[in-house]
Image: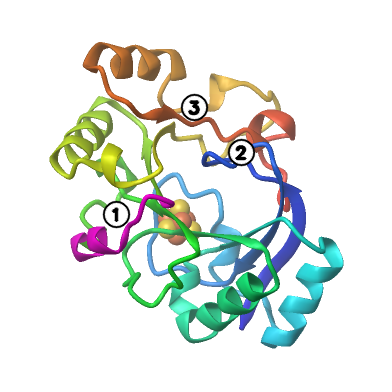
Amino acid sequence: MQITEIYRSLQGESSYAGLPCVFVRLTGCNLRCTWCDSEYTFSGGEKMSLQEVEAEVRRLAPSGLVEITGGEPLLQEREAVPLMERLLALGYTVLLETSGERPLENVPPQVIKIVDVKCPHSGEFGTFREESLASLTARDEVKFVLADRADYEFARDFTRQHDLVSRVRSVIFSPAFRKDARGARDSSHCLLDPQQLAQWILEDGLEVRLGMQIHKFIWEPSTKGV
Ligand code: SF4
């Protein structure tokens, strides 16, 4: 597998936010989101065998949470699926962060899928594979990264249209973060003011979670490997 980095930190997003987690970040992505903060994963990386990845995960944490992320990890599905199966067999709770552009059918059902449905401002609108809705279960999560009112309205309407709240464990509306953010560890870097987003969610009576990327508030926003 082509791996950009493997490290242990705190989970910054999803309903697992705040928990210690080992991140396995795979190299390569076929999308180019305007606010992407992981462009360093698009190329490079190191070739590692499944056994080497597993050994590194075990060295960093003998149990707990592991997230398979990228880039787009399912571009390496042939290796990523056996890795997930192996980590599950070892007793880890496995999260998979994916754009939803790749098929999800072969992901082991015990894996918690966190699917990032792209909104208009992302520049990759329409890439979510709607057939994948059938693969989502009550353990999975759907995330929308929002930069403006048009993104919010798309996410709101999509959530209602597909009854996401009763379909998955958590629907997350998350303000997009400026990709060139430096310095202050506060919400001034959000493209959409979280207070505004909170107001819209409450006004519309949505049962969704407002998600902040807490790693951007703990560490300096440009820090990698956290
Ligand atoms: S799918 Fe993820 S890694 Fe790929 S460009 Fe979008 S934000 Fe970046």
Mark 2 or mark 1, earlier in chain: 2
Which is more foreground, mark 2 or mark 1? 2
Residue at the location (43% across, 51% down)? Answer: 139
Amino acid on which disc 3 is placed:
Cys
Asked whether the viewer can see residue 84, the reply is: yes
Position of 74 compared to 185: left or right? left
Task: Classify mark 1: residues with Cα within 10 Å, few (<14), some (14-19) or many (20+).
Answer: some
Residue 17's disc is 2
Relative vertical location of residue 225 with respect to residue 215 in this rendering, above or below: below
Residue 214 place in picture, x, y as percent: 63, 33
Viewer-nearest residue: 137 or 35: 137
The alpha-carbon separation of the residues under discs 3 and 2 comes to: 18 Å
Relative vertical location of residue 67 with respect to residue 165 in this rendering, above or below: below
Numbered disc 3: secondary structure: loop
Residue at the location (61% across, 38% down)? Answer: 17
The residue identified by callout 1 is 124
Rendered image quadrant of residue 75 = bottom left
Mark 3 or mark 1, earlier in chain: 1
The alpha-carbon separation of the residues under discs 3 and 1 comes to: 19 Å
Q: Quadrant of ligand 1?
A: bottom left
Residue at the location (54% across, 84% down)? Answer: 79
Residue 213 place in picture, x, y as percent: 57, 35
Position of 201 compared to 161: left or right? right
Amino acid on which disc 2 is placed:
Ala
The residue identified by callout 3 is 190
Q: Which residues are magenta?
A: 130-140
Residue 132 shown in magenta: yes
Outermost residue toward the left?
161
